[in-house]
Image (spheres, helix red, strand yellow):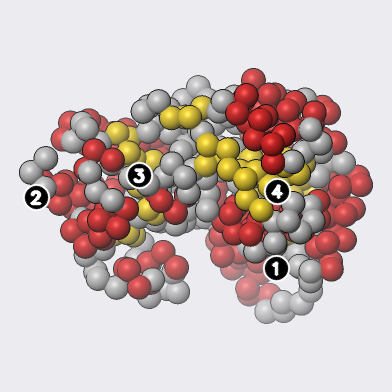
């Protein structure tokens, strides 16, 4: 049994999450960026200690075993058959998305994303001189869905060249079903649209939901798509900057590698390689227990709102450890809500509006923390909400 209740002090450790300006007040509980507060897998720590004790940190490259454990993880966890030649390493998925944008589109091309969505998608497009096209997800008050007639119409009317898919979808926690992915792929194939599928949260899926890698939907999808994977969210390794980008199509892979070289993007560092190898070799049981613990955190949070503040709606997460909460009933604009959360509830959250159209009035909570931290955060929030006399 692993101890996910263990509280580890993260302040004054160069932590983006805990040492940022908004966390200087010791009352503030940081629950924003997708960075877990759990100690990583023991075997990863041992692998890093072993590497550090060697004392020489020269140029490194992935071993044959590195590729094999990545391949095995994808096969055993996701029934995803990956070939070694398909794997291209990058120092992070956002880096890979930017490289894909530069590789497969040209300046002023239109690239489509579904809103609300992970905000670096916008930046990856705009910083490279491309145009963002929004396809808004439908929301019925309980769950999100895609209107595929609108999806196709938006592609056609804007001459879209690329679609960046988020699966599981951050921040709403949606795990796309195979039928939905089939429609996405079929429409994109019909109109010559490249698909970049960000599957970094693939290991976080709950209940009877199942993550379906984009390649598993249809064999032909391999001809026009890229799948982005990494151990960083699953094992809390973000600072080690290691991602495995899967590109089955040889021509697409060659172009991506050439763009990577032209931009001076290197492979991950030696610590990242060792951490990934240890994670995918020894981490299955750790992840299983982690998912059980996170599910209990989700249940606790849902019960808190249902019991005390039923007008506030927790969108049931199918995946992720990021919980999307509808707080529009409070009647606050985005600035008022942000101020309330930080200065009244003393919570540092990711504000819904940063995820774009459809996000205002929502908050994203990172519940990948010891339960004592979650209880403290919700207690503070409850006291702040009580002061509003709802």
Rendered location of residue 35, percent (x, y)? 46, 56
**Residue 110 image label:** 4
Alpha carbon separation for disc pair 1 and 3: 37 Å
Q: Which of marks 4 and 3 is nearer the N terminus?
A: 4
**Pointer 4 with pointer 2, Cβ within 8 A:** no
Residue 24 in sight here: yes
Give me the residue at 47% from left, 37% from top.
Answer: 173
Q: Mark 2: give few (<14), some (14-19) or many (20+) Cα within 10 Å.
A: few
Q: Which of marks 2 and 1 is nearer the N terminus?
A: 1
Q: Which numbered disc, 4 or 2, marks the residue that appears first in the sequence?
A: 4
Foreground tag (4 vs 3): 4
Q: Distance between the residues labelled 2 and 3?
A: 20 Å
Give the label, 4 or 1, closer to the camera: 4
Horizontal and vertical percent for residue 267?
A: 76, 64
Q: Name the residue under label 2.
A: 387
Residue 297 at least partly seen: no
Q: Residue at x 76, y 67 (%)?
A: 265
Q: Which residue is drawn at 39% across and 41% down?
A: 324
Say how many tags the image has.
4
- Mark 3: secondary structure: strand
- Answer with left or right where residue 223 lies relative to residue 141: right
Q: Residue 138 at what x, y percent from top left?
A: 48, 29
- For disc 3, the neighbor class at 10 Å (few under 14, some 14 to 19, many from 20) is many
Please tell me which of labels 2 and 3 falls first in the chain: 3
Residue 333 position in % (x across, y down): 28, 51
**Which residue, given by chain and number where applicable, does mark 3 sit on?**
362
Q: Quadrant of the N terminus?
A: top left
Q: Say whether disc 1 or disc 3 marks the residue closer to the N-terminus.
A: 1
How packed is label 4: few (under 14 Cα within 10 Å), some, or many (20 or more)? many
Q: Name the residue under label 1.
A: 269
In whole angstroms, how far apart are the C-alphas of marks 4 and 3? 28 Å
Q: Which residue is drawn at 18% across and 58% down?
A: 344
């Amino acid at each position: 049994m692993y101890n996910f209740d263990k509280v580890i002090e993260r302040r004054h450790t160069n932590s983006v999450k805990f040492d940022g300006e908004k966390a200087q007040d010791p009352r503030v509980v940081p629950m924003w960026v997708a960075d877990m507060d759990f100690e990583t897998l023991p075997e990863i720590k041992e692998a890093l200690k072993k590497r550090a004790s060697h004392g020489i940190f020269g140029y490194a490259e992935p071993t044959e075993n590195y590729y094999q454990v990545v391949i095995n993880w994808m096969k055993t966890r996701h029934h995803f058959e990956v070939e070694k030649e398909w794997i291209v390493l990058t120092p992070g998925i956002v880096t890979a998305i930017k490289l894909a944008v530069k590789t497969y589109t040209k300046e002023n091309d239109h690239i489509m994303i579904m809103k609300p969505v992970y905000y670096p998608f916008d930046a990856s497009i705009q910083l490279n001189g491309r145009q963002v096209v929004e396809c808004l997800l439908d929301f019925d008050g309980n769950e999100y869905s895609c209107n595929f007639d609108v999806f196709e119409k938006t592609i056609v009317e804007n001459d879209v060249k690329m679609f960046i898919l988020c699966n599981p979808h951050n921040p709403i926690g949606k795990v796309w079903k195979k039928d939905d992915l089939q429609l996405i792929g079929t429409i994109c194939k019909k109109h010559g649209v490249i698909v970049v599928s960000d599957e970094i949260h693939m290991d976080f899926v709950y209940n009877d939901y199942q993550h379906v890698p984009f390649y598993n939907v249809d064999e032909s999808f391999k001809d026009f798509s890229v799948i982005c994977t990494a151990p960083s969210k699953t094992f809390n390794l973000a600072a080690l900057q290691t991602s495995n980008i899967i590109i089955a199509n040889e021509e697409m892979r060659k172009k991506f590698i050439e763009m990577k070289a032209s931009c001076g993007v290197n492979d991950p560092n030696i610590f990242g390689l060792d951490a990934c190898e240890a994670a995918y070799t020894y981490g299955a049981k750790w992840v299983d227990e982690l998912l059980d613990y996170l599910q209990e955190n989700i249940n606790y949070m849902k019960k808190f709102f249902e019991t005390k503040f039923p007008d506030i709606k927790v969108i049931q997460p199918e995946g992720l450890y990021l919980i999307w909460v509808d707080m529009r009933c409070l009647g606050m604009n985005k600035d008022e809500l942000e101020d309330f959360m930080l200065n009244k509830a003393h919570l540092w959250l990711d504000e819904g509006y940063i995820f774009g159209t459809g996000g205002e009035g929502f908050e994203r909570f990172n519940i990948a923390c010891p339960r004592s931290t979650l209880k403290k955060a919700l207690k503070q929030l409850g006291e702040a909400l009580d002061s509003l006399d709802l």
